[in-house]
Image (cartoon, helix red, strand yellow):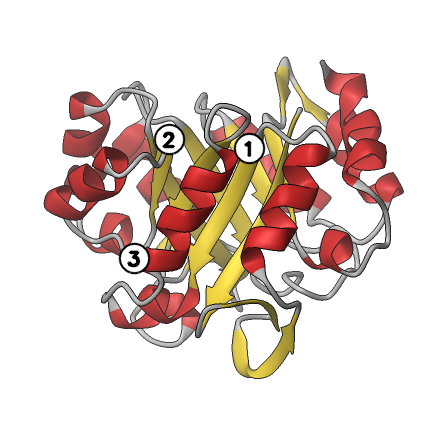
Amino acid sequence: MELYPAIDLRRGTAVRLTQGDFERQTAYGDPLALAEEYVAGGATWIHVVDLEAARTGTAHERRVVDRIVARVAGRARVQLGGGIRSEDAVAAALGRGVARVVLGTAALADPSLAVRCARRWPGRVAVGLDYRIGPDGVAEAQGHGWSQGAPRAMAELLACWEGEPVGAVVATAIARDGTLEGPDLDGLRSLLASTSLPVIASGGVGTMADLSALARLVEGDRRVAGAITGKALAERRFSVEEALAACAPSV
């Protein structure tokens, strides 16, 4: 299982939100320093999100993203999400050295966009499904930085991309994100059963035991391909080295 240390950007600073609420923000300082720390610890991926872009569709942190890409070049790859809503935006991000982009809101609004981009750049385009469990118990994906827009049924969306060269499904449990209360293992198990695409889990990781639980999670012959953790690393609850060791059981 790959480890994806997360750096969420807002106003040039590394921050974390709790359950996507912009009023519940904690700042963690210089994003370049965090990126350097994570790569020095052995991380081979950095997951970067432009938070304002996620809800507005307009890039706010391009300069900082470019500096992170340059800082980790040759040592780690950058996976970028937030506000990427067109094929041109995907091309621009990949052209600036980003290894993989995550289409969230745009993929929900137009699943065929993800198909076109995945076919043009196989393996370098992921779809981001930030989900809640609806009143009927069905998992629903939410876009626009979780602040607006009608949710879409996860199963319906996954069917659109089955068999396509999509790099991953980045699945974020909104209710768990930023809480450090543990990942949504049941939801991830259901997701693994619903798609053959690689699944990257996001939301709720607070301890190494949480990472170990993700690494051991099995549904049929399927396992979680990666785990995103941001707040726990930024708060030094464990190191990157310790996190990588916890991820190892599924290798």
The amino acid type found where label 1 is placed reads Trp
Question: Height in image: 248 above or below 148?
Answer: above
Task: Give residue 160's position: percent from left, percent from top.
Answer: 26, 34
Q: Which residue is drawn at 54% across and 40% down?
A: 46
Callout 3 secondary element: helix
Q: Nearer the viewer, residue 9 or 188?
A: 9
2 sits to left or right of 164 = right
Task: Please give the label number shown on residue 45.
Answer: 1
Callout 2 secondary element: loop
Label 2 crowd bin: few (<14), some (14–19), many (20+), radius 10 Å: some
Question: Height in image: 251 above or below 4?
Answer: above
Q: Residue at x 53, y 29 (%)?
A: 76
Label 1 crowd bin: few (<14), some (14–19), many (20+), radius 10 Å: many
Marks 3/2: CA–CA distance: 20 Å
* Image marks 1 and 2: residues in contact by CB distance under 8 Å: yes
Marks 1/2: CA–CA distance: 9 Å
Camera sees residue 173: no
Question: Height in image: 58 above or below 32?
Answer: below
Mark 2 lies on residue: 99
Q: Nearer the viewer, mark 1 or mark 3?
A: 1
The amino acid type found where label 2 is placed reads Ala
Considering the image in quadrants, where does the N terminus appear? top right
Give the residue at the far left of this rendering: 88
Mark 3 lies on residue: 105
Callout 1 secondary element: strand
User: Which mark sits nearer the N-terminus, 3 or 2?
Assistant: 2
Task: Please give the label number shown on residue 37.
Answer: none
